Image (spheres, coloured by chain):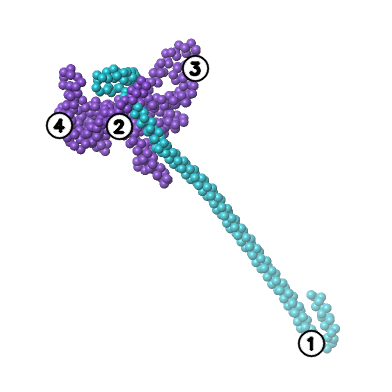
Chain colours: A purple, B cyan
Amino acid sequence: MRFARLAFALVSAIALPLALTPRAGTAQGSAAATQTAPAAEKPAQPDFITPHISDGSKIDVPSFSLRENLTREIELPKWAPVHIGPLTVDLSPTKHVVMLLIAAVLCALTLMTAAVSQARSAATGKPPRGFANAIEATVLYIRNEVIIPNVGRHGEAFVPFCLTLFFFILFMNLLGLIPYGATATSNISVTATLAIVSFFVVEIAGMRALGKGYINTIVYWPHDMSFAMKVFISPIMTPVELIGKITKPVALSIRLFANMIAGHVVVLALISLIFTFGSWLVVPVPVIAATGIMVLELFVAFLQAFVFTVLVSVFIGQIRESAH
Amino acid sequence: MRSVFTRSLAMLTIAAPLLAQEGGEAAAKPSLLSLQSGLMFWTLVVFVILFVGLSKFAFGPITKAVADREQALLDAIEAAKKDRDDAAALLEQHRKAIEAARNEAQRFIAEGRAQAEKMKAEMLEQTHAQQAELLERARRDIDSEKTKAIDELRREAIDLALAGASKVIEKNLDDAQNRKLVESYLSSIK
């Protein structure tokens, strides 16, 4: 019941600024159309889905002026690109960088507050209560039921990494559900980076666990076959093994990114129905539907963070066990 | 089916930056699948800092506190078990002491009973003996009295006889000689 109310509040918070912006959107869209594509014949449709889900150099902050549609856009500073060898990296902060930072700060604050209050209650010899207890229960659940069983023996070393992944992704996912927020995890660059980091962690875990045997996870060289058979099959299977290695992080990054973007697109598309129909009468249907999707999104935010963590721990466990 | 799909998406992803670069100038906004190196850099930096910070200040203390609490619980359980064992041992000891005391009491009672029994028998015997002795004494007294009476009677009889005889034969007979005669006669009939 409380979730539904929360979701309704979220939806109305998103819908309200949107409801007041069709004109601005149209103006923007047509302006963009005249600027970039003078050849375009058909009138440009206002597109407020893509700007909402993609990265940009502006962030939205709350405004209390109805003239500004309750939203003020703040232009982020633009820095000169940095040249690292042949690469040119534009390190200017973007909307998703800001969200990333906010998520990280919130995540750190939440967990450290919990740790501090837990330490305080530990000093009195009592188990923590309330919020600290909830965080502790989550941490323990992920650690004891997800990471350690999947990673296998001596899995403690990987617990902080996997837990950081879970909470960081969770906070980024949840930020997207808050008005004026954006989902950094709906950007493939973010999920790909996390997946690449996980990939390196998995491979290094494999190298440390298997030693010289790690090469067997790349070059297919089964010890229970004749030499001729090995020579025959190795060139075929080695690329397959390699593709298998690369697929995991790619699937990880796309799964998270696509899941996060999908919910937002659906919510925005539903809200857009109001403007497509251009009638107040149609308002309740998309609002109710979007509320439902929002509730689902809340679940998906947790689920995808959980899935990412589970899969990373499974991959670590797999590569460490592959020698046996 | 799904892996084919993800792989094709993967290829798209890998190709996306190239595609984006190619058409970078033409398309004003970047494709959803293009990788932005700046954002990737920031993600990496933020993630690494968060990882270091959280493992040092959040997960480390939380897991340590939980482990400590678990240890404390285990210790408490262990101590409770030890206390219980001690209590059980003590109870056993007390039970034994009570059992011993009960046996002792039982023994005392039995002993007392036996002693009483013995005393009763002794007293009975003593009474019997006394009774017998009394009877015996009475009988002896009676006997001696009887003898005495018989002697008395005899002497009286002698005296009477003598008196009578002396009356009869006072004249012709010496008292002393007659007496001797009668005495000898009486002793012969004894």
Q: Quadrant of the N terminus of chain B?
A: top left
How many residues crowd mark 4 within 10 Å: few (<14), some (14–19), many (20+)?
A: few
Q: Quadrant of residue B55?
A: top left
Name the quarter where the C terminus of chain B is drawn: bottom right
Q: Position of residue A130 (x, y in %)?
A: 35, 42
Mark closer to the observer (1, 4): 4
Q: Residue at x 24, y 22 (%)?
A: B28
User: How many angstroms separate mark 3 from mark 4 (CA)?
Assistant: 71 Å
Callout 3: helix, strand or loop? loop
Question: Taking the image as drawn, is residue A189 in sight?
Answer: no
Mark 2 residue type? Val
Q: CA distance from mark 2 to mark 1?
A: 178 Å
Q: Are marks 3 and 4 on the same chain?
A: yes
Q: Residue at x 56, y 54 (%)?
A: B102
Provide the residue designation for mark 2.
A98
Q: Are marks 3 and 1 on the same chain?
A: no
A196 lies left or right of B154: left
| Any part of residue A48 in sight | yes
Kindly report the distance in space between the C-alpha atoms of the residues bearing marks 3 and 1.
169 Å
- Amino acid type shown at disc 1: Lys
Residue plotted at (19% across, 34% down):
A68
Residue A28, by quadrant, is: top left
CA gap, disc 2 and disc 4: 35 Å
Q: Nearer the viewer, residue A48 or A259?
A: A48
**Which residue, given by chain and number where applicable, does mark 3 sit on?**
A223
- Write down the residue under mark 1: B167
